[in-house]
Amino acid sequence: MRTVNVFSLVSLFSFAFSCFAETHIPAGDVFGIWEAAGSPYYIDGEVHIPTDSMLLIEPGCSIIFTGHYKFCVDSNAVLRAIGTEMDSIVFTAQDTVLTDSTGGHHGIRFSYAADGCTLMYCRIEYGNAFGDYPDYYGGGIYCYHSSPTIENNTIIENSAALHGGGIYCWNYSSPIIVNNTISGNSAEVHGGGICCWDSSSPEISNNKINGNSAATGGGIYCWNSSPTISNNTISENSADWGGGILCWGSSPTIENNKISRNSAGYGGGIYCDNSNPTIINNTIIGNSADYGGGILCGYNSSPIISNNTISGNSADDHGGGVFCEYNSYPIIFNTILWQNTASTGNEIYVDYCEYGGTPYPCTLFVAYTDIDPGDCYVEGDTAGVIIWGDGNINADPLFADTLFHLSASSPCIDAGAESAYVSIWDTVIYAPEYDFEGGARPYGAGWDIGADEYGSSIIARHSENKPRLIEIFAYPNPFNSSCVIFVETQNLASLPTIAIYDFRGNVVYKLPPLSSNSFLPKEKGESFPLLGERETQRVRGRFTWAPDEKIPSGIYLVRATILQQNKSVICTKRIVYLK
C-alpha cells in the first residue's frame, strides 16, 4: 500500500517549507498544494495523485526526480501545474544522461485522469520511458484515456524506448496541445515529438515541433487516429519514415502548418500509409528524402491536397514534390508544385508496385495546380495514371518573399477555383474559406493557387461590410453533438437548397425542400445571433444538424445555393464535428 505524504503538500505547512527551502517527497500519494516556498521538491520515489484527489503546483516550483520515478495521475484525479510566462514550473531529473535503461525520470503519466488536468507554462525535460509494457511509452507526458490541457510548455530532451518521446496519446486520449515548444525528443520506434495512438484525436495547434527523431514519424506519428494538426511549425525532425508527420491508418486534418527542413528515407515532409488525410493551406518547403521529399502517398492512401505550396523539396531517388505508390489515389487541387528536385520526377513520381505478379496502380487527379507536367513521371505502362483536370498552369509562381507569399505579378493570383469536379470518382472538392494566415478567400476575381491568397488580409478586415446575397453562420463551431445552422438571404424569390458535404465532396446530409415558412423576415431592431444588424429586407432560416453515430469526426462544408438571374450563387461554411 502506498503511504500518504501530507506534510509536504498542504499549504498549512508553508512556513516549514520556507525554513528548509527544499522538500523531499517519498514514494506514495500526493495531494493538496505545492507552494513555491517549499521548492525545490525532490521526488524520491514513485508518486501518485490518488483517485478523486487534486494536486495544485504553484508558479516557481521545481520538481526534481532523484531517480527513474513516475509521477502518476490516477483515475479521476486532477493535476493542475500552472505556471506563468515569467515564473514557470520545471519538471527535471538529477541524472540527465538518458540511455535505454538508465537516467532521467519516468514522466508525467495520466491514466483515466479527470477533466481539468492542466500543464501550463511548465518545462518538462529528461523524461525517459523504458521498462515493461506500457512503461516504454511516453517519455515526457503519457496519456491513457485522458485529455489534459497541455499549453505554453517547453517539452524538451525526453525519450521513449518505443513510442512518444515527447507526448504519447493512447486509447481515446484527446488532449489540447497548444502553443508548446516540443524539441529534441526521441523515440526508438514511433513519434519522436508526439505519438497519437488508437483512436486518439488531440488538437495539436500553434506548436513549435522541431528537432525530434524516431524510426517513424519524427515530428508527429498518427496510428488509427485523426488529430487536428494546425498552425504548427514542424521543422528539422528526422525519421526513416515520415520526417515531419506520418499517418498510418489515420485521417488527420493537416492545416495551415509550416512543414520545412524535415528529413527521412521515405516521406520527408508527410508520409501516408493506408490513410486519407486532408492536407490544406500548408507550406511544405525544403524537406528531403530518398523517396517523396515533400509528400509520400503509400499503400491505399487517398489524401486531399488542397491549396498548399510545395516547393524546394528534394528526393535522392524519386519524387521531389510528391511520390505515389501501391493503390494511392490523391487529389491535388489549387496547389503550387514548383522547383522540387529528384533524380526522376521532380514534381510527381508514380511508382510501379506489384504483389504476387499483380500490379497495384495509382491514380492522381490534378486540377488548378501550378506544375510543369514535364517534371512528372509515371513508371512503365501499368504504374498508374495522372489525370489532368481543368485549370492547371505551368509558370513561375513568383513568390514575393521567403514566407512564400505571392507577388503582385504572380500568375497564381485568381487562377484557382472554388471547387473542382473529379469525374473519375464523381465527387466535388472545395477550396478552404481561408488561407494559411487566416485571410479570407477569395480576394479579387477568384481563388488563388497555393497556400497564400494575395491581398486577403484587406478583405478579411472588411468582410463584414461586404454585401452578399446569402450568408451562412453556424453555432457552436466546433460542435460535438448538434450544430445550429443559420442561413440568411435577401428575399424569398429564390429559396436556397442546403446540403452538408464531407471534404471529399460527398453529401452526408441534405435538407428537404424548403418552403417560405422556413424563413422569417428580419424586423427592425432585432439582432440575429452572430450577424448583428443587417438591412431590413433580409430573411433568415434556422436549422439543426445532429449527425448520426455513423458520421465520423472531421471538417464538413455547409453549402447553400440560390438562383439569381439564372445563375447559381453559392455560399459555403466550414464546420468542425468533434465526437
Image (cartoon, rainbow, N blue to C red):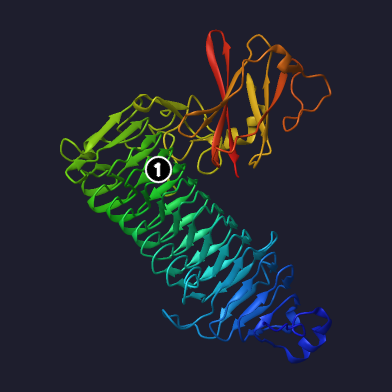
Residue found at x 63% / y 42%: 478
Callout 1 environment at 10 Å: few (<14), some (14 to 19), or many (20+)? many
- Work out whether 482 lies above or below 542: below
In the depicted view, which residue is nearer to us: 304 or 550? 550
Is 248 displayed left or right of 52 in the figure? left
Is 331 displayed left or right of 280 in the figure? left
Place of residue 69 in the rendered image (x, y in percent of width and height, measured from the top left):
56, 81
Place of residue 131 in the rendered image (x, y in percent of width and height, measured from the top left):
46, 77
Q: Name the residue under label 1.
A: 309
Place of residue 542 in the rendered image (x, y in percent of width and height, measured from the top left):
71, 25
Is 505 displayed left or right of 4 in the figure? left
Q: In which quarter of the image is residue 465?
A: top right
Q: Quadrant of the N terminus?
A: bottom right
In the depicted view, which residue is nearer to us: 357 or 71? 357
Looking at the image, how many numbered discs can be counted on the residues?
Answer: 1
Outermost residue toward the front in this view:
1
Place of residue 517 in the rendered image (x, y in percent of width and height, measured from the top left):
73, 14
Residue found at x 65% / y 41%: 479
Q: Is mark 1 on a helix, strand or loop?
A: strand
Outermost residue toward the bottom in this view:
20
Residue found at x 19% / y 46%: 356
Q: In which quarter of the image is the C terminus?
A: top right
- Work out whether 348 lies above or below 29: above
In the depicted view, which residue is nearer to us: 161 or 257? 161
Q: Quadrant of residue 141?
A: bottom right
Q: Which amino acid does label 1 sit on?
A: Thr
Can residue 468 be seen here? The reply is: no
Is 313 displayed left or right of 95 in the figure? left
Residue found at x 32% / y 37%: 396
In the depicted view, which residue is nearer to us: 478 or 405? 478
